[in-house]
Each structure stands twice: as structure tokens, then as C-alpha cells.
């Protein structure tokens, strides 16, 4: 760009009613990725082939090679609030490349004020090389709002008359100033931005880069099952309106007089990132609805595995002609009208069908994996009478399902089971194990050790594994790892809290009950309206809340957790059809106590209601002691076994 010309008499003004820009820019857009998405959409509409985003030193710069604007267009188009480009031009596509126009309401350019104090625009017209540079300052704009003045002068920084030579540098640069860019995780930003667009997939001539790197694939390659790819012929018959699959793997389906494209996948493990969980809707390549479940009724999420599902649906028709279902901030669509209701019905039906198919596929895959693990024992199992084979095979499959059991210990345990059965020993115990539902590794260890089934070494090695896992958690806490990483680690090792929680798994079937109680009782710092962990086993629910690092536990925290648990217990009692019947125990874990003497009696009262309060040091010490005592006992009983002593 050229040096600015001093003393220019050019004037620009923003004409907008007081408070409107505050609502459109500041109130509606709070995340950098939402703001940048609006400017990327503008670059697409301007027929740019590349958008370069640079996040650095308190600024975010968005550079494109679109058609740019001359001075008059800056005033009439950019600074005119609510201009409907499609209505004004009578066209749904761009001038040069015939791209579907994303802009409609003429307000996305003000999104920058949601995160920045100042927005600077420098643009060169591709048509005549005219250069215009101006700055919008939210403080100055709001000062005019205070005066009830709808005419807000905009500072012109530079103006250069048309020059054919300058056309080779056409394009627009938008710079958002006055941000805290140090808090933006670039990798996460790229992933979130990628999830908001399909533009780079539907057009070969459009690229988005962030700090010099292109965006990652916005549909994970880590999915265990992807539909329609993994649909069988029988499955496809169930989707009556599917007409085929395109070259990029999207299912094509007729919907009334329109066309829908979709691809929906399931992860192997529950999805932790909320922005991934659910189905996104796209219109003309841009996200119109953040991931959701089409407002599916509560109470069935646990049955349908919604915590595993992610997907994308293309519905261009919701933003075409008279159809305008997209909310102003482009984060949600309106499902209340007639068309919206049909979209909702379609989405719920698709989720139910694909979840049912996924459950069957998942079950078949898990069974096949377990069968493969039993491969080397197939001959020995085959030598047993059918009734005996079923009993022993059931026990071996239970052992094969223990995810944390190493391959060596798996083989040792299976060999021991077969050896004892073949020799006619402990058959009553083995039969009892085969008939025990939902048995976990710890329960099996107890049963086998009581019968002197396992060698002391096998038991000691298992205990050592537990102690090492506790040590790893201690390191994570000492290194001040992110709260989510600590939470995820405990989700994987719930027995760290107490050995009896070994069989408890992540629970999402009562998500609505937990959310409602959280909003009611925990909607303030440091809880922010949510509990950190919910696990279940059988009919029992376990809740765990971690206070943010540095926040001491005080009386107010304890009272709020008490009311929170009481409300959930009451709600579970009323839902007679729910498999979960009670909150067995709830934990509150923090760095320390604000005034232990003042809250000691309150802690004792809560303990009687199975609401337990611990510090991180207390949790780690308690967990280590339980397993170290057990290991010491094994060492005392086997003083001459060097292998055990070395553990």
C-alpha cells in the first residue's frame, strides 16, 4: 500500500441509530473465531481466492484478494447498515466467480467490535485502483450514541485517486486492534474456524490460512464410524429419500422440493469438546447452526449415545429467496416456522436411525475384537464340552474387556482360568464370575485373590499399576495442567477417588437434570453453572466438582453444592422411568480451605449426606495409602520373592 496523503478532504460517515451498533457488534459476537468468520465470509463474497489471517502483537489482520471497494462503495456499501446485497443487486451469486452470496443482513462487518476497540480498513478497487483507508473507533462511535446522534463521522486515514497501475494490488485488509492476542490458542482457533466453513471443500479456488498455515480438515479422521460411508445395502434401504452419495462422501437426500447433503460420524470415545458434539448445519458453505441435536426430547440421550455423535448437514435452501431461517449472529436457525418444524423432524429421525445403526456396528466390532483377543485360546476352548465352553468363554471375554489390562497379564489370567478349569479346580468360582454382571477389574481381583487363584506377583503388579497412575495424576496437578486434562484423567481412572468407584463410567443420560440444577445453584464463579464430572454404575450416580486452581473452599461453595445435590436427588426420585435412582456420593475437591475451623462442622454435616470435601493433597494421599498398604501387605507375606520386593 502507498504512503497516505496528508490533509485529504474526503469524508465518510456511519449512519446508524443509537445503541444499534452496540447490540450488533459488542453484544452478539464475543469470540474471536465468530468475528473472523464474518470477515472471511465477506472475502468469499468479494471473489477472493485467498484469505490470510495474521494473529500477532495485539492485532488480528485479515487480508484478501477480493475485488475491493472504491471510495463511494465504502460509504454506500460498507458503512450502510442493514444493506441487503442480494435484494439491491437482484442476484444470489457474486459478479466474477458466480459464488453463492453469504452476506444478507449487512451487519457482519460490525462483529469486530465484539473483541476490538478499533477496526481499520484499507482497500484497493480492482476496477480502477482507487485506494481508501479509514478507521472505526468504538469509543468515538458510542460517544455519538450518548448524544443521540445517528451521524457518526469516520476517520479517513488515506485516500489515493484511481490509478490503473495500482489495480495489481487490489484487495482489502481489515485490522482489528486493541486485543489480547496472547490468550488465543492458534491451533484451537484454526480448528474452530475450520468447523465454521465448508468453503474450501466446495470450491477449489478458495484458501484460508492462519499465521501462514492452512486450516485442518473440518471433519475428523479419528471417527470410528462414518455414515453414509459405512452404511450397508440394508441400511441404505431404510433411508427412503436418499438418492445417492457424491464424490466427496456426502449423502444426497431429497427434502420436500429441496436437496440435503449430510455426513455423520461417531467417535470411539465420548466427545469432550462441546463444539464437536452434535450436528452442524451449513448454508452455502458457512455454518448457520452450531452443533445441536435438533431439539431432541430430553430423557433419551443416554439411550442414543449422543455423546459420541458429530456431523454436518448442508441445507442451502434455508438462506435462499424468501427462506431466511438463520439468526442474525449465524449461530442458530429458527425451527419454529413450518419449514423449521419439518427440518427438526428430519433431523431427529436421522439421529435416531443412525444411532441405532451405530450401536449395532459398535457392538459387532467390540465382539469381534474380543473374539480376536481370545484367538490363541480357541483350540483349548474347543476341547471343552459346549456347556463348559460357554462358562469359561464368558469369563475370558470379561477379562478381555478390561481396557487397562496389559497383554501379558491378559494372557496370564486367561491361562490360569483355563488351567484351573481343565484340572477341575475352582469351577464354582469361575462359574460365579461368569454369572456376575458388569464385573470390573478390581472386583475380579478381589474374587480371585480371596480364592488364592492368582499368584501374589500378579496381584502386586496390578496394584503397582494403580500407584503409578496416582503418581501421574499428582504430577499433572503439581504442573498446574488445565482443568479439563485433570478431569479427563480421573474419568479414565475413577478408582483414584476411591477403589469402589472402579466400575463407574461417564454418565450423560441425566445431562438435562444436571444442567438445570447447575444453572440454578452453581451459576457463578468458580463453578460457572456446571459440575465437572458425572459417573454412574447401575442405578447410582457419582458427582465430582473441582474448584479452579487457587480458589479455596469456603462455606458458600459447600452450601451451593449441597443444594445442587439435593435438587438432583429430588429430580431422580421423581423420574420413575430413569435407570439412575440416586446420587450415591458427591465430592468437592479444591486446593485448600479458606478457614477450616469455620467450616469443619459444615463438612461433617455434609459427610453424613454423602457429600465429601477433599483437597487435592488429601485425595492423592488417601488414594496412595490404600494401595500402598495393600502392596506392603503383599511384600510382608512374600519376603523371599525378590520380584515382589523390587516392586
Image: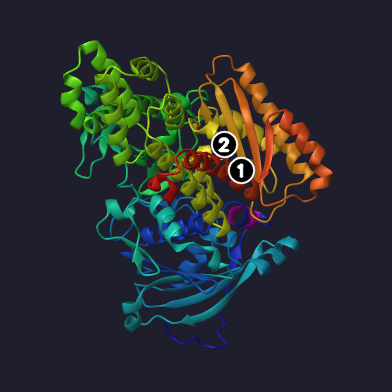
Measured Cα–Cα span from mark 1 to mark 2: 8 Å
- Residue 357 can be seen, yes or no: no
Relative image position of residue 218 (x, y in whole percent): 35, 50
The residue carrying pointer 2 sits among few (fewer than 14), some (14 to 19) or many (20 or more) residues within 10 Å by Cα, namely few
User: Magenta residues?
Assistant: 20-25
Q: Position of residue 223 (x, y in %)?
A: 32, 42
Q: Nearer the viewer, residue 36 or 217?
A: 217
In the displayed structure, does residue 622 sit left or right of residue 260? right
Q: Is label 1 in contact with label 2 (beta carbons under 8 Å)?
A: yes
Q: Residue furthest right?
A: 598
Q: Is residue 396 above or below residue 228?
A: above
* Residue 533 visible in the displayed image: yes
The residue lying toward the viewer, choosing from 65 and 178, is: 178
Tell me: 530 left or right of 434.
Answer: right
Residue pointed to by mark 2: 498
Q: Position of residue 278 (x, y in %)?
A: 43, 38
Amino acid at each position: 500500500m502507498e504512503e497516505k496523503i496528508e490533509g485529504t478532504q474526503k469524508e465518510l460517515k456511519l449512519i446508524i441509530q443509537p445503541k444499534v451498533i452496540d447490540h450488533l457488534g459488542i453484544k452478539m459476537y464475543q469470540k474471536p473465531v465468530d468475528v473472523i468468520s464474518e470477515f472471511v465470509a465477506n472475502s468469499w463474497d468479494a471473489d477472493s481466492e485467498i484469505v490470510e489471517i495474521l494473529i500477532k502483537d495485539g492485532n488480528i489482520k485479515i487480508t484478501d484478494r477480493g475485488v475491493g471497494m472504491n471510495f463511494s462503495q465504502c460509504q454506500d456499501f460498507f458503512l450502510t447498515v442493514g444493506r441487503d446485497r442480494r435484494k439491491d443487486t437482484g442476484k444470489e451469486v457474486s459478479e466474477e466467480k458466480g459464488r453463492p452470496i453469504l452476506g444478507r443482513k449487512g451487519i457482519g462487518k460490525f462483529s469486530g467490535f465484539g473483541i476490538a476497540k478499533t477496526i481499520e480498513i484499507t482497500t484497493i478497487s480492482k476496477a480502477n485502483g482507487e485506494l481508501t483507508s479509514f478507521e472505526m473507533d468504538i469509543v468515538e462511535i458510542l460517544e455519538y450514541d450518548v448524544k443521540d446522534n445517528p451521524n457518526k463521522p469516520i476517520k479517513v486515514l488515506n485516500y489515493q485517486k484511481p490509478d490503473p497501475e495500482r489495480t495489481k494490488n487490489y484487495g482489502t485488509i481489515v485490522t482489528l486492534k486493541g486485543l489480547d492476542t496472547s490468550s488465543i490458542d492458534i491451533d484451537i482457533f484454526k480448528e474452530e474456524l475450520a468447523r465454521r466453513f465448508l468453503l474450501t471443500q466446495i470450491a477449489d479456488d478458495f484458501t484460508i490460512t492462519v499465521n501462514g498455515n492452512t486450516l485442518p480438515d473440518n471433519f475428523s479422521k479419528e471417527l470410528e464410524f462414518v455414515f453414509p460411508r459405512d452404511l450397508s445395502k440394508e441400511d441404505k434401504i431404510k433411508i427412503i429419500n436418499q438418492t445417492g452419495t457424491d464424490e466427496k462422501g456426502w449423502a444426497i437426500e431429497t427434502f420436500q422440493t429441496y436437496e440435503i447433503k449430510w455426513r455423520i460420524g461417531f467417535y470411539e470415545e465420548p466427545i469432550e469438546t462441546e463444539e464437536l458434539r452434535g450436528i452442524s448445519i451449513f448454508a452455502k458453505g458457512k455454518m448457520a447452526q452450531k452443533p445441536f441435536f435438533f431439539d431432541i426430547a430430553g430423557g433419551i440421550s443416554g439411550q442414543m449415545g449422543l455423546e459420541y455423535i458429530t456431523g454436518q448437514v448442508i441445507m442451502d435452501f434455508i438462506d435462499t429467496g424468501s427462506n431466511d431461517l438463520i439468526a442474525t449472529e449465524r449461530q442458530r436457525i429458527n425451527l419454529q416456522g413450518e419449514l423449521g418444524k419439518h427440518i427438526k423432524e428430519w433431523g431427529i429421525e436421522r439421529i435416531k436411525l443412525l444411532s441405532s445403526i451405530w450401536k449395532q456396528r459398535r457392538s459387532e466390532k467390540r465382539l469381534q475384537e474380543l473374539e480376536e483377543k481370545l484367538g490363541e485360546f480357541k483350540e483349548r476352548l474347543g476341547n471343552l464340552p459346549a456347556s463348559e465352553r460357554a462358562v469359561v468363554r464368558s469369563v475370558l471375554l470379561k477379562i478381555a474387556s478390561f481396557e487397562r489390562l496389559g497383554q501379558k497379564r491378559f494372557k496370564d489370567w486367561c491361562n490360569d482360568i483355563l488351567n484351573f478349569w481343565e484340572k477341575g479346580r475352582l469351577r464354582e468360582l469361575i462359574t460365579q464370575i461368569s454369572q456376575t454382571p458388569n464385573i470390573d477389574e478390581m472386583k475380579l481381583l478381589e474374587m480371585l485373590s480371596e480364592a488364592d487363584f492368582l499368584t501374589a506377583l500378579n496381584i502386586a503388579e496390578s496394584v503397582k499399576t494403580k500407584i503409578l497412575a496416582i503418581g501421574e495424576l499428582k504430577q499433572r496437578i503439581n504442573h498446574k495442567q488445565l482443568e479439563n486434562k485433570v478431569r479427563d484423567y480421573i474419568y479414565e481412572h475413577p478408582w483414584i477417588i476411591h477403589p469402589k468407584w472402579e466400575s463407574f463410567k461417564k454418565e450423560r443420560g441425566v445431562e438435562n437434570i444436571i444442567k438445570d440444577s447447575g444453572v440454578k445453584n452453581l451459576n457463578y464463579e468458580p463453578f460457572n453453572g456446571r459440575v465437572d464430572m458425572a459417573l454412574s454404575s447401575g442405578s447410582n450416580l457419582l458427582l465430582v466438582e473441582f474448584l479452579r486452581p487457587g480458589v479455596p473452599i469456603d462455606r458458600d461453595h459447600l452450601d451451593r453444592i449441597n443444594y445442587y445435590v439435593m435438587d438432583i436427588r429430588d429430580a431422580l426420585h421423581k423420574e420413575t422411568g430413569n435407570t439412575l435412582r440416586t446420587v450415591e456420593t458427591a465430592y468437592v475437591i479444591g486446593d485448600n480451605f479458606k478457614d477450616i475451623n469455620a467450616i469443619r462442622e459444615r463438612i461433617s454435616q455434609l459427610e453424613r449426606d454423602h457429600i465429601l470435601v477433599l483437597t487435592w493433597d488429601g485425595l492423592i494421599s488417601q488414594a496412595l495409602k490404600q494401595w500402598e498398604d495393600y502392596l506392603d501387605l503383599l511384600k510382608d507375606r512374600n519376603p523371599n520373592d525378590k520380584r515382589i520386593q523390587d516392586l
